[in-house]
Image: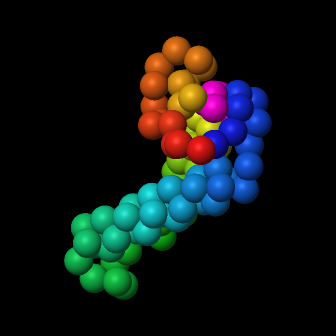
Amino acid sequence: MNGILELNWINIKSALIYGLLMAIFAMLVQIKQAEELTKVDWGMIVSSGVMALVTATISVIKNILTTDKGNFLGVVKVITPTEK
């Protein structure tokens, strides 16, 4: 874990995983709604990718604003602290 206003590689990798999972889920939903791959609205697929990028960015912001004790902005517990 990191202190407030600090990041480490685990935080960045976690954000990328969130974004990737969001993109895959959104694309699968779009393909399911189209019922055929040839009828997929590619504009919506691009929009899904943008939303995945937003998700990853929000995850990084949350990690930047979370303390070593797992409190968001030092107030709300969002992560269970790990034993060292």
Between 11 and 69, which is closer to the camera in this rendering? 69
Residue 31, visible in the rendered structure: yes
- Residue at figure coordinates x 71%, y 32% from the top left: 3
Residue at 43% in and 68% down:
24
Say which residue appears at 34% left-offset and 71% top-offset. Answer: 28
Q: Residue furthest front?
A: 84
Vertical placement of 48 versus 7: above or below? below
The structure residue drawn at horizontal position 53% and vertical position 47%, both measured from the top left corner, is 55
Residue 54 showing in the rendered view: no
Pick whichever, 70 or 72, lies toward us. 70
Quarter of the C terminus within the rendering: top right
Question: As displayed, is residue 61 above or below residue 32?
Answer: above
Outermost residue to the top: 75
Q: Is residue 14 left or right of residue 8?
A: left
Magenta stretch holds residue 59: no
The quadrant of the picture occupied by the N terminus is top right
Magenta residues (range):
64-68
